[in-house]
Image (tube, rainbow, N blue to C red):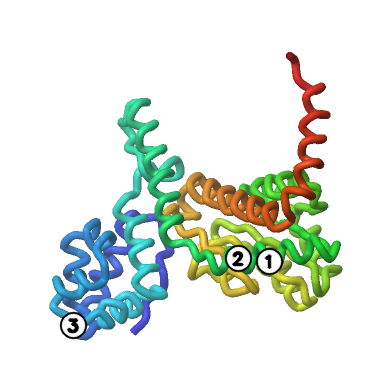
């Protein structure tokens, strides 16, 4: 029996659902569920082999338990579980407590960000990044369109991406309005490239415009969390996984991850284009900008 994903903002919602599901699960899966309920924080951090050993079940049984509860698999389950047991201060920041002093907040926010960056470094797919860089470079060299789509906070990231590529002399556009995204996607074609950025991976405008661009033959690159609907909509998925609940917290770590991924793409594309082409241009730009600053 499958159970729908969490609906409410109750911090114990996920654990309550596991308790409610236990009687309907197979005995082996029940043991996994009881292990999770006994120490959810440890469960979220332990590898599948350790979870299987402690539950006295096979590793596939651990995965089956997660799917029986209504999640895509162990990775998705653990990510959501980590967000549940580390609630922080709702709608403000998931890593802080209400009575934290300024110094505590500084340490926690920075440590949370650094931890997310290191996790991304260890888990990111260089193959996916390579494909995205190739698509962007090919579009630039063929003088085709490169566009960035984002809504809300992700719209700001899209504009940052446009600015960074513009500084390389690459003509790109960024749209944060849903109507403009749909219209723009409608005139894209083979050889063009669009990068769709989303924290939740569930924004209707972005999914619609991504679908239109893909059907028109443009290469679609999506930057969003694994397991989201948008993740499977693009040709190339650059996963940006984090435990920040999109319906509970303002994008902080997720925004920084997206900006970092853009930085990686910009740097790799610049290296593909080559220093002989870019360095004279960038040198001239820096020289002209000096007059805009006080000595």
Residue at figure coordinates x 35%, y 44% from the top left: 88
Badge 2 local density, few (<14 within 10 Å), some, or many (20+)?
Answer: some
Percent x, y for residue 86?
32, 50
Under circle 2, the secondary element is helix
Looking at the image, is mark 1 or mark 3 nearer the viewer?
Answer: 1
Sequence-wise, the earlier of marks 1 and 3 is: 3
Badge 1 local density, few (<14 within 10 Å), some, or many (20+)?
Answer: some
Badge 3 local density, few (<14 within 10 Å), some, or many (20+)?
Answer: some
183 or 289, which is in the foreground?
289
Percent x, y for residue 166?
77, 46
Q: Quadrant of residue 181?
A: bottom right
Q: Is residue 264 above or below residue 68?
A: above
Question: Could you tell me how far apart the alpha carbons at marks 3 and 2 are, in whole angstroms?
Answer: 41 Å
Question: Could you tell me how far apart the alpha carbons at marks 2 and 1 are, in whole angstroms?
Answer: 6 Å
Sequence-wise, the earlier of marks 3 and 2 is: 3
Describe residue 134's horizontal placement relative to residue 27 as left or right: right
Q: Quadrant of residue 96?
A: top left
Q: Which residue is mark 2?
A: 130
Circles 1 and 3: CB distance less than 8 Å?
Answer: no
Percent x, y for residue 206?
68, 63
Residue at figure coordinates x 35%, y 68% from the top left: 77
Describe residue 47's horizontal placement relative to residue 235 as left or right: left
Percent x, y for residue 68?
33, 80
Q: Which residue is mark 1?
A: 134
Q: Is residue 151 visible?
A: no
Circles 2 and 1: CB distance less than 8 Å?
Answer: yes
Question: Could you tell me how far apart the alpha carbons at marks 1 and 3 are, in whole angstroms?
Answer: 46 Å
Q: Which residue is mark 3?
A: 28
For residue 92, the mark is none
């Amino acid at each position: 029996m499958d159970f729908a994903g969490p609906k409410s903002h109750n911090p114990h919602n996920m654990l309550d659902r596991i308790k409610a599901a236990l009687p309907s699960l197979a005995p082996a899966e029940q043991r996994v569920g009881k292990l999770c309920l006994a120490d959810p924080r440890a469960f979220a951090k332990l590898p599948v082999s350790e979870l299987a050993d402690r539950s006295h079940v096979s590793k596939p049984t651990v995965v089956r338990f997660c799917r029986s509860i209504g999640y895509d698999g162990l990775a998705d389950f653990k990510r959501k579980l980590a967000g549940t047991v580390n609630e922080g201060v709702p709608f403000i920041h998931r890593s802080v407590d209400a009575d934290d002093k300024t110094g505590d907040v500084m340490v926690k926010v920075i440590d949370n960000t650094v931890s997310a960056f290191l996790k991304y470094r260890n888990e990111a797919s260089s193959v996916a990044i390579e494909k995205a860089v190739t698509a962007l470079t090919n579009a630039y060299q063929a003088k085709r369109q490169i566009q960035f789509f984002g809504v809300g906070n992700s719209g700001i990231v899209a504009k940052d991406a446009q600015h960074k590529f513009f500084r390389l002399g690459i003509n790109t556009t960024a749209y944060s309005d849903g109507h403009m995204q749909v219209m723009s996607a409608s005139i894209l074609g083979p050889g063009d490239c669009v990068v769709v950025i989303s924290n939740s991976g569930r924004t209707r405008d972005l999914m619609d415009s991504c679908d239109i661009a893909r059907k028109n033959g443009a290469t679609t690159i999506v930057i969003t969390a694994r397991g989201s609907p948008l993740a499977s909509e693009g040709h190339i998925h650059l996963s940006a996984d984090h435990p920040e609940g999109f319906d509970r917290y303002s994008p902080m770590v997720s925004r920084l991850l997206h900006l970092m991924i853009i930085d990686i793409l910009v740097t790799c594309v610049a290296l593909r284009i080559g220093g002989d082409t870019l360095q004279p241009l960038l040198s001239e730009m820096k020289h002209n900008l000096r007059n805009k600053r006080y000595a």
